[in-house]
Amino acid sequence: MSASQVNAVASSDYTVQAGDNLWNISRQHGISLTTLTKANNIDLNNYVILPGDLLHVPASNITITVGDNPIADAAKKVAAQKAQEAAAQQAAAKAQQEAQQKAAAAAQAQQQAAAKAQQEAQQKAAAAKAQQAQQTQTAATSGSDLKSYVLNKMVAATGQSAATWDYIITRESRWQSNAQNPGSTAHGLFQSLWINGSDDIDVQIADAIRLYNADGMRPWAL
C-alpha cells in the first residue's frame, strides 16, 4: 500500500552526497523523479550521479506517492529474472543428471545381461562337450567299438596281434565285460582274478597289461 503527501518547495540547487540516488533526491525535495530528470536533462538509462554533482531542483507543489519507485521496480524485475534463470539452470542440471544416471544404469544392466548370456553359453558349450565325450566313451565301450577300443589298447601295450587278443577274450568271456566265473573271482573280458568284479573296461585292460608285463601270455595259457 502506498501513501501520499503534498509539499511546497522553492527552486534550488543540490549537491549530490555519497549514497544519494535520483529517487531519494526527488523525494527529499518533494518533486517527481520525472521532474528532476527533465530539469537536469538526465536520461535514466545512460546517467550515473556522483558525489559532488550539482543538480537543479525546480520549485514544486505536487503530490508524491511514496513507494512509486521505478528504479526499485527495475531492480526487482532484474532480480526476479535472475531467480527464474537460476531456477531454470538448476532444473536443467537436475534433468541432465537424472538422464546420465538412467543411461549409466541401462548400460550396467546391459553389461550384466551380456555377461550372464556369455556365461550361460559357456556352460551350455561345456555341458554339450561333456555329453559328447560321454557318448564317445559309451560308444567306444560297446559293440564293435568296444572290440576295436580294447584290441587297439592291447596291441599298443603288448605288441601281440589283435587276432591273438581277440582269440583270448572270445575264449575267456565272449566279449562280455561283466562275465563272471561262478567257481572263482575271475571276472571281465580277460577273466582277471584281481579286479574285484569291476565292469570298467579301462580297469580290465590295465590289469591285463599288468599281467602281461609280469608273465607274458602265460596267465592265458599261451
Image (cartoon, rainbow, N blue to C red):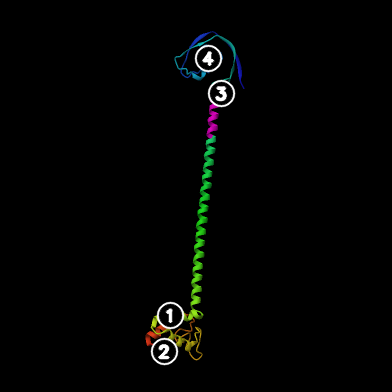
The reply to whether residue 213 is in sight is yes
Viewer-proximal residue among 144 and 13: 144
Q: Secondary structure at mark 3?
A: helix
Which residue is painted at 37% across and 84% down in the image? Answer: 213
The first of marks 1 and 4 along the sequence is: 4
Task: Quickly name the residue at label 2.
Answer: 219
Label 1 sits on residue:
152
Q: What's under tag 4, amino acid-wise?
A: Thr
Dot 3 crowding, Cα within 10 Å, few <14, some 14–19, many 20+? few
Q: Mark 2 vs mark 3: which is more N-terminal?
A: 3
- Of marks 2 and 4, the one in the foreground: 2
Q: CA distance from mark 1 to mark 2?
A: 20 Å
Q: According to the image, label 3 marks what residue?
A: 73
Q: Residue 102 location in percent, x, y? A: 53, 47
Element type where label 2 sits in the image: helix
Amino acid on which disc 1 is placed: Asn
- Picture coordinates of residue 199 (x, y %)? 49, 81
